[in-house]
Amino acid sequence: MTGVAVVALAAAFATLRQRPASTPPTPPAQAPLGAQVYERLGCPACHALRGSGNPAHPLDGVGRRLSPEQIRTWIVAPQRMKPGVRKPTYDQIPQEDVVAVVDYLRGS
């Protein structure tokens, strides 16, 4: 019985090791504009992305961890995501800028 369990576990681990590494999502169409808006809003003062900016709050991989709607909410209404967070609310910027930054971060 123990031998069967060992063989089953070995097969499971072998299968897991053969899976391709996850690849970052393809940057959406608005990503280039999003990079400009991200810089213009001063996001690198508090956040790091791709090795640049403040490493205290890295955003690498945020597109794999959060949905586009969650990213958008962090931008325009951060208090809804985490009450008491010390993050500016960007609810007055044009909607197309918000969409562009979301697309940019989804490709991170």
Image: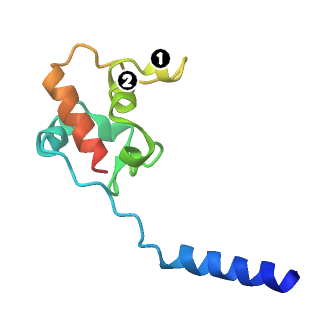
* Amino acid beneath label 1: Arg
Residue 66 horizontal/vertical position (percent) = 42, 39
Residue projecting furthest to the right: 1
In front of the other: 46 or 67: 67
Labels 2 and 1 touching (C-beta < 8 A): yes
What kind of colouring is applied to the model shown?
A: rainbow
Give left or right: position of 2 versus 62.
right
Quarter assignment of residue 37: top left
Above or below residue 20? Residue 62 is above
Residue at 54% x, 17% y is: 83
SS for tag 2?
helix
Residue 20 horizontal/vertical position (percent) = 41, 73
Residue named by callout 2: 73
Residue 38 horizontal/vertical position (percent) = 23, 37
Residue at 26% x, 35% y is: 102
State whether residue 53 appears in this view.
no
Q: CA distance from mark 2 to mark 1?
A: 7 Å
* Amino acid beneath label 2: Thr
Residue 80 marker: 1
In front of the other: 29 or 10: 10
